[in-house]
Image (cartoon, rainbow, N blue to C red):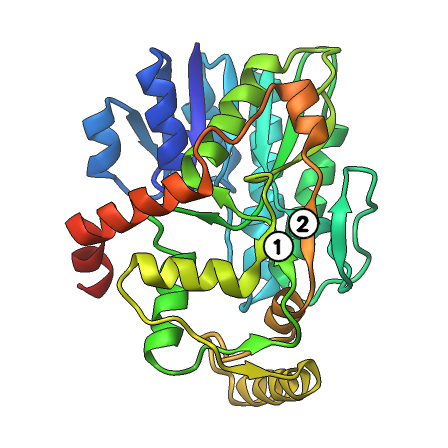
Amino acid sequence: MKILVTGGGGFLGHAICRLLKARGDEVVSLTRSHYGALSALGVRQVQGDVAVLDSVLAASKGCDAVIHTAALAGIWGNFDEFSRTNIGGTMAVIGACELNGVGKLVHTSTPSVVHAGHDIEGGNESLPYATQFKAHYPATKAVAEQRVLAANSPKLATVALRPHLIWGPGDRHLLPRILARARAGQLRFIGAAKKVDTTYIDNAAQAHLDALDHLAPGSACAGRAYFISQDQPVALEEMVNRLLRACGQEPVTKRVSPAIARVAARFFETLYKTLGKQEEPPLTSFLVEQLSTAHWFSIHAAKRDLGYQAKVSTVEGMQRLQEWWQREGRMKLDG
């Protein structure tokens, strides 16, 4: 197959490109910049903006499928920027698929689209979308996912995946944030220990290939969303400390109450907005919500309809992460 991966230079996008090339697919990536790592894989790169229809049209011409991972992530920033990339970019991808006659669209979403601020323990895809969000990222991703699923048709089969807390070698988003806060003495756990889902990078990437291979007009997965994880929920503090230990850092034990954390988050948000600061505050209401609630999900549907399974265990993933850190990660993240 000839497949376009939007955001192929990102953590997840690169892993997907690697797996696609390993099995012999022709891969094109739409990215803002040129990535030497993609060239080394033999991926053809088209530089452009995912929110510009002409860019996506050029990149997806002649493709059989699109895997749409490009997004603006984060928990702080301007709504218009999140909307332009996450909603506008997704609409451009859908439009390009329809105009170029692309038959399959696999969309990367997030479990945060259904998180309404309370504990979710073993929830499945019947959970409704949240109606209020404490950050622009999940709010815009919820709209984007709904647009993708609504675009499912006899000519364009669509599916959305919701991988949770992706981690592993090469991570330049979650891991650097944890390490930076731990080293600065700013990392605190909030409230009682709650379980969350996580997803090792290769498993998250494989889920996209599984969805691609099972997707077709009228198939069981067409027009549906699926949770993806290790299928092994773990206490958040345990997972964070395992990541820290894999990178040679001491575990964190400090804790703060949810009430104090919420007050602190509102203070920082108000201060940063008043001062017009662009950088992320030390604490936000969205972060407090995520750190103080359980959010883990059943992946029965993904196993049934996509044939998904977490082939790389958390133990093996941690070993790979530790080896990567000792080999090159320390220099990349500390450099």
| Front in this rendered view, residue 182 or 211 | 182
Indicate the position of residue 138 as horizontal and vertical percent values: 65, 55
Residue 301, how many percent across, how many down? 72, 27
Q: Is residue 281 above or below residue 41?
A: below
The residue that disc 1 covers is 196
Residue 104 image offset from top left, x and y in percent: 59, 17
Q: Is any part of residue 67 visible from this angle?
A: yes
Q: Residue at x 39, y 58 (%)?
A: 243
User: Residue at point 59% right, 33% down?
Assistant: 107
In the picture, which quadrant includes the N terminus? Answer: top left
Residue 268 image-quadrant placement = bottom right
Which labelled disc corresponds to residue 296? 2
Residue 49 in the image, given as x and y percentages of width and height: 43, 42
The residue depicted at 60 percent of the width and 19 percent of the height is: 307
Left or right of residue 105: residue 176: left
Placement of 218 over or under 80, stated as above or below: above
In primary-sequence order, the first of circles 1 and 2 is: 1
Residue 60 vs residue 270, the one in the foreground = 270
The extreme front residue here reads 315
Element at label 1: strand
Task: Using a 10 Å C-alpha cutoff, classify the residue at mark 2 as few (fewer than 14 neighbours), some (14 to 19) or many (20 or more).
Answer: many
In the displayed structure, 45 sits above or below 156; it is below
Is 274 placed above or below 281 here?
below
Spatial separation of the CA atoms under disc 1 and disc 2: 5 Å
User: What number is the disc on residue 101?
Assistant: none
Check disc 2 and give the amino acid type. Trp
Residue 103 visible in the shown view: no
